Image (cartoon, helix red, strand yellow):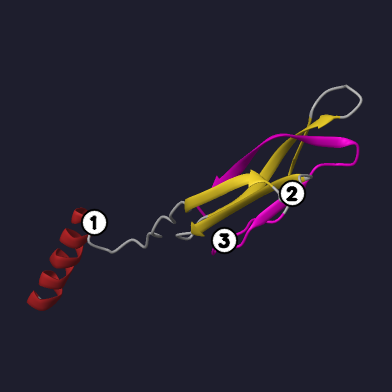
Amino acid sequence: MKKRYTALLAGAAMALLGLQGAATAAPAGWPTGCTSHTSWTGGGWLAAWSHSKGGHYKAAVICTRDYGGPDVTVHSVTWKDHGDPSFIACPPLTSVKSGIIITRSY
């Protein structure tokens, strides 16, 4: 009986102190070492990172219409990691105005 009482007290103390060991996931890192510029063909935006650190990225570009009208913003559908380049082209009859890199930590 004394052993059960001691075990019960020890279990209650561990529960009160939070020693049950809750599982938590380590946060993923953000990509580092980026390069981003107009593509060599001039028709889109190219983005690359040297270290993904568990994060992901993709290219986005703002394109100007050749014959006027509002700018067009498009981004790559696929998230990249491990230094793979991400490319997005402007639609026909548009040209590159500027570009950005979109990142996420997972």
**Residue found farthest to the left:** 2
Residue shown at 23% from the left, 56% from the top: 18
**Residue 39: percent from the left, percent from the top?**
71, 49
Mark-to-mark CA distance, 1 and 2: 49 Å
Of callouts 3 and 2, which one flags the residue occurring earlier in the amino acid sequence? 3
Quadrant position of residue 45:
top right
**Residue 47: percent from the left, percent from the top?**
62, 50
Say what amino acid the circle numbered 1 marks: Gly
* Numbered tag placed on residue 102 in the rendering: none
Q: Is residue 1 left or right of residue 19?
A: left
Say what amino acid the circle numbered 2 marks: Ile
Q: Is residue 27 above or below residue 4?
A: above
* Numbered tag placed on residue 81 in the rendering: 3
As rendered, which of 52 and 40 lies closer to the eye?
40
Mark-to-mark CA distance, 3 and 1: 37 Å
Give the secondary structure at mark 1. loop
Residue shown at 10% from the left, 77% from the top: 3
Q: Is residue 8 above or below residue 103?
A: below
Quadrant position of residue 56:
bottom right
The residue range painted magenta reads 78-106
For mark 2, what is the residue?
Answer: 88
Q: Is residue 92 left or right of residue 12?
A: right
Residue shown at 18% from the left, 55% from the top: 17
Of callouts 3 and 1, which one flags the residue occurring earlier in the amino acid sequence? 1
Q: Is residue 21 left or right of residue 53?
A: left
Q: Residues within 10 Å of mark 3 (few under 14, many from 20)?
A: many
* Numbered tag placed on residue 18 in the rendering: 1
Please check the rendered image and state whether residue 80 is part of the magenta-colored stretch, yes or no: yes
Q: Is residue 84 above or below residue 31?
A: below
